Image (spheres, rainbow, N blue to C red):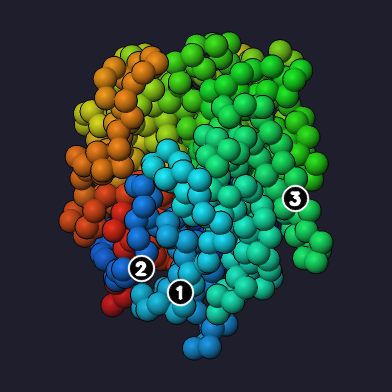
Amino acid sequence: MVNKKLVLSLVFVVLIGRCVELAAGDWPTFGHDPQRSGYAVNETKLNAQNVQHLSLLWKVKVKNEPRSLTALTAPVVADGVETPQGARSVVYVAGSSNNVTAIDAATGKILWSREIETRILPKHPGMWLCPNNLNATPTIDARRGLIYVISADGALYGMDLATGKTKFGPIEFVPPFAKDWSLNLWHGIVYTSVSQGCGGTPSGIYSMDIRNPQRPTVRDLIVEHGYGAGIWGRGGVTIGENGRIYAATGDGPFDPANGDYGSSVIEAKPQSLKVLDYYSPLNFREVTKYDLDMGASSLVWFAYRNFNLVAGGGKEGVLYMLNAGSLGEKDHQTPLYRHRLSNDKLEYEQYGIWGGLSSWMDTKGEAWLYVPVWGQASKKAPKFPITNGPDPHGSIMAFRVVIDPLTKQPTLKPAWVSRDLDVPDPVAIAGSVVFVLSTGENTQQTVGSAVIYHGQKTLSDQQKSENTHRAVLYALDAKTGKTLYQSDSDIETWTHFSGLAIASGHVYVVDHDSNLYCFGVPEN
């Protein structure tokens, strides 16, 4: 018999432990925390009872030139920043034209804006696959009072949260004009991932040990010795509470003996970046052959009872959950859960699981998993007890983690499917509410068949910018998927590869026109 008081006590201890690390007003990295949970665990102002009253509190246009689909990174937030105007909660966004901007969270007033000088010119013109832009969402180091940013030319800057002045660097982190992804910070080491061979950079994980700012150490883990196997999930690398580094790789050669880990999930040691374990699906050859990247979605690390878990997905449309302590078990190919959610035709664009997964632990100690799915649900998808209408363009699919009565191992139980969403981004969770942005972007990549073959013509930046739709913010009940709020026409344009932030009762959204939006419940 389960001791409910003990379960609730354990949940309380976990939450209190996290409170020490992050205040309610902080959203310091993509997905809120190093585990990329998307869960604003300390948020108290937003809940299922009041989100119907959400409204646009302010918006501000940031001085930034959108380039090759990209505009602003996902927002990050720091509370209690001692600015010249006094203590403030501050929202930060970086821009594709190599800049960083700090905005007062209460008023939308720009506190400072910093353009970063590019010291090197790219060899090739940018386009949406290799934009030559600042691409990685920054991360905040509250203890040092810094925000870390990778500039377009690959240098890491540590800027003062209050003034924008450079306090660390610039130090070359990744090669110039590499396509790097959201920064992560763990115990004095900054991490990023690289994909697609942009700037001639091999795919892999890169780290900079900044514990001694005078002698920072840069390391890399190359996961494929050509230019494949890109780690291009929106959140970059994921760091478990066990201190291990996790990432999903794109299609590429799979030969662990020679250090090639295409179409895999890898676990690495934090300081040395030595590969400790890996999982590769049984059909990894098919995944690579048909460009069905597992790396299209960032992993989420979460705990349930005495299990540490990792979950992910990719363009193939298959959701998988792994034991974080033994990826794929002894044969490296045995997941705890694997099921197709979308993309029955195995097309390499417009369908599947993109961006990143998110997790939530409710007040009863039950773990939930939220999956952004592009396109209609697969005919082979599991049966969900709650649906919220047809989903031709995309949806959020929610699962509960349960213990299989036969194996005594964790597995996933389908819970609900959301309403139709026009290309959903990774969700953010607060107060039993799931927030999701229907991005409205054009997901077509090439002209011709959407099943991979040689000679397909890639769309231009201009063509990719056409046939887009206005982005819409939705608030959904975390346990049923019921729509509680939608922003209608408040957001002016679409957005590409971004993410949400939640802090102190505010939800932050960006769009392609370099606008930052703040939604919240108006105070009486």
Assign the N terminus to one quadrant of the image: top right
Q: Earlier in the sequence, mark 1 or mark 2?
A: 2
Marks 1 and 2, how far apart in space?
9 Å
Element at badge 3? strand
Residue placed most toward the observer, 269 or 410: 269
Amino acid identity at mark 3: Val
In the image, 466 versus 266, the foreground residue is: 466
Query: What residue would you read off at disc 2?
Result: 62
Residue contact at pointers 1 and 2, CB within 8 angstroms? yes
Residue under the image location 53 percent in, 48 percent down: 177
Q: Position of residue 297 (x, y in %)?
A: 49, 34
Q: Position of residue 385 (x, y in %)?
A: 34, 26
Residue type of the residue flagged with mark 2: Val
Q: Position of residue 206 (x, y in %)?
A: 67, 44
Q: Upstream in the sequence, badge 3 or badge 2?
A: 2
Left or right, 468 with reference to 90: left
Query: Where is mark 3, residue-wise?
Result: 218
Dividing the picture into quadrants, the one containing residue 161 is bottom right
Q: Residues within 10 Å of mark 3 (few under 14, many from 20)?
A: some
Residue 113 disc label: 1
Residue nearest the observer in this picture, 25 or 207: 207
Secondary structure beneath dot 2 equals loop
